[in-house]
Image (cartoon, rainbow, N blue to C red):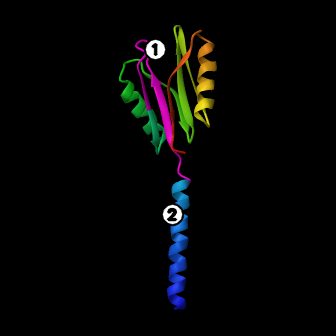
Amino acid sequence: MVRHFKKTVWIAALAMIFTAALEARDYYGAIAYSPSTRHYGYSYDYDYKWGAENSALNQCNRNDCQVVIWFRNACGALAIGPYGYGSGWGSTRYGAEQAALRSCRKYSNGCRIERWVCTTR
């Protein structure tokens, strides 16, 4: 009976370690934007920064697309105005949107949020 108990405790400990490792995982996202066409692409919940950036660029699918923001375990946003754009990130959607609007207003008036996205964590 003691042997069975030790085995059960060991299995429970491994399960807790495995669960903690999954929870500690980082999630990456990105937004890509084409200033000439105003097309954009976005991604979230990628295991690696480069994966998130490549996915956003592929989705944007224009010659001049560029990654304008990447984020880890957070949110990103893209704001567009008549004469420019801006991007930002934050721990919440609201924070990311406010950062993107501040950035956009440096180049244009009439900025509005075009896209926001958050990772799961």
Q: Is residue 112 above or below residue 115?
A: above
Residue pictured at 50% horizontal, 82% vertical: 7
Q: Position of residue 40 (x, y in %)?
A: 42, 23
Q: For numbered disc 1, what is the local secondary structure?
A: loop
Residue underneath mark 1: 35
Residue underneath mark 2: 18
Disc 1 crowd rating (10 Å Cα; few below 14, some 14-19, many 20+) is some
Q: CA distance from mark 1 to mark 2?
A: 44 Å
Q: Position of residue 27 (x, y in %)?
A: 51, 44
Q: For numbered disc 2, what is the local secondary structure?
A: helix
Which residue is at the front of the view, 95 or 89? 95
Q: Is residue 28 above or below residue 108?
A: below
Horizontally, residue 14 falls left or right of residue 98, namely left
Q: Is residue 31 magenta?
A: yes
Horizontally, residue 85 falls left or right of residue 41, namely right
Residue pictured at 55% horizontal, 72% vertical: 13
For marks 1 and 2 on the same chain, the one whose residue lies earlier in the sequence = 2
Q: Is residue 39 magenta?
A: yes
Q: Is residue 82 above or below residue 76?
A: above
The three-letter amino acid code for the residue at tag 1 is Pro
The C terminus lies in which quarter of the figure?
top right
Residue pictured at 42% horizontal, 21% vertical: 65
The part of the image, by quadrant, that contains residue 23 is bottom right
Which contiguous range is marked in magenta? 24-42
